[in-house]
Image (tube, grey):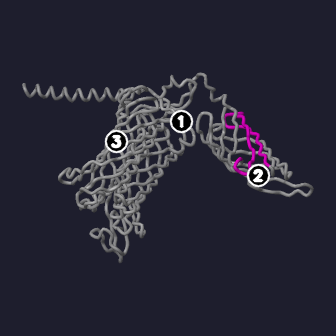
Amino acid sequence: MDKMTKMIGWNKGWLSVIVAFLLAGGSLSAQEQYELGSFFDNWFVQGSAGIHATTDVRVKGGFSNLDKPTLAVGTAIGKWFSPQFGARFSVDGLHLSMQERKIGFVYAHTDLLWDVTNTWSTYRRNRFWNIVPYVHMGFIHEFESGDRSRVLNNEYAGGVGLLNRFRLHDHVSLTADFRASLLTADASVVQGIGYTGFATALAGVCYTFGNGVWRTRQQAVGQEGVLSNGFWDNWFFTFGLGVNGLTGLHRWDSRPALAMEAAAGKWFSPQFGGRIGWQGLRFSRRGTAPFHGVLATEKDGYLQEDFGFAYVHGDFLWNLSNTVSRYREDRVWDFIPYAHMGLLEEYRMGGGGIFATEFAAGVGLLNTFRLTSELDLYADLRGFVLRGAASGDRSTGVTVAGSVLLGGLLQVGKSAFDSFHSEGTAVREEDRNWALSMNLVDYARLGTIQGSIQYGISRRVSVEAAARINNHSQRFSAGARWWPWYIYSGWWVKGLAQVEVQEEAYGAGLSLGYSLLLSRWLNLDLGVGGWGGRKGTGDRSWFLAPNEITAGLMFVF
């Protein structure tokens, strides 16, 4: 009976946990949608000061040798992509105390922020306290205290943290930031201890610029844009195959080897996302000098080395296509550069054990090609950098690796972001047909006075009249622009007819450019073009010449 009672109690306990999780998951999926704003909204800067303390982390034996705290300062700039997710780039440092030795350091790192308060509860503009756990990865530079020219170590580092934000105003908050970081043994200055860890506690001030408030669709009266999705939306999984290469800087001796990867990620907004991935199988090298020594075998007069590896990494994704142009669910090709960092282990093939563990970091370019709303093909080009010990090339201290991967990407949950256009006092999109432009390049060159006016006659075509006047030339033109996506946004092609009064020239021209949306009313207009025709009096001659280099502002109304 007692056993039955205990079993029922145990089952009730687990049942309550499961029910609570399901209810929490339901609340996450039922979150209200918010206007994501423009690229320039929800940026913030931070300044802080506090303390660092280091400790040794032994592979066997736990923590030891906790050093005395030292003063620390830090600064950061970041952006919130949605009420739940954001990222920041931080630099902090000053001094560390290691084994009773005082050294200077600078730690530059990128942090992925998760506001759990806004995730597990409804976003509230006037909430006083927000709890924001995060992961961080970066690079630490150590030098002799008092002599910055004497470099002690350059190491990758990573860890976790907890940021607490206390609201004073829509744009101002106080922060309390607690962070734990892990480095390889070399960073401790005293070798052979396993790893070095250090803890950081910082207090500071955060200022949010741009629009720092998230508005619901109902609150965004007269606005247009893209809405956020729920926590379980916009997740994706990838699987791919390809080739790897690994080499030191002093020689190129890598041979292509089979690579495999699997990853899971989420888009926080149409522009920004993150993913966690595993990449592995093997590296292969061939040369006349030994690398790791014990792994090299002689083959055809050369030393050949084959060993396995596993790279677990976090990536910060930036969808450049959705940033420089408007978000489109049906876009065929998305161009996505990213930065990645993680931990790479090298091991002997056939179960011989791990012989090297290194932090790695680098950049990549992910290209996705839409097949359906749930399935994409992708091509991923990735490069990363490790310490020289990873390739046996200790002369430069650097190992370079790269991979090319092809595979499939599966969208899970809702994959599209909803667009909206609220009725209200603002001018509606179809009424914003006029645009005034001025080319800053012309103004900088010989004081040329320049301007143009456009009118949209359809969704993809605008007509234009322009003038450029200075002491040496007076040009007047009329033409039309074709916009593949929508007038006053994205790529454009312009055809024009033009006259030049000073040289009595006339002709036609062609220009190509791109208009980047900075805000609802303002674009950055870029382009180049040429023209040709006849000029002179009497015996006219034909000519072909450059016509314009455009880098200016376009006011849309």
Q: CA distance from mark 1 to mark 3?
A: 30 Å
Q: Can you tell which quarter of the image residue 15 is in?
A: top left
Q: Residue furthest left?
A: 1
Circles 1 and 2: CB atoms closer than 8 Å: no
Split into 4 quadrants, where in the image is the N terminus?
A: top left
* Residue denoted by label 3: 202
Which of label 1 and label 2 is nearer to you?
1
* Residue denoted by label 1: 38
Q: Give amino acid for label 2.
A: Trp
Q: Is residue 262 visible?
A: no
* Residue denoted by label 2: 531
Q: Give amino acid for label 3.
A: Leu
Which range is magenta? Answer: 443-470
Tell me which label, 1 or 3, sits earlier in the chain. 1
Q: Position of residue 379 (x, y in %)?
A: 47, 51
The local crowd at label 1, few if under 14, some if 14 to 19, many if 20 or more residues have their Cα within 10 Å, is some
Task: Specify whether residue 535 is painted magenta.
Answer: no
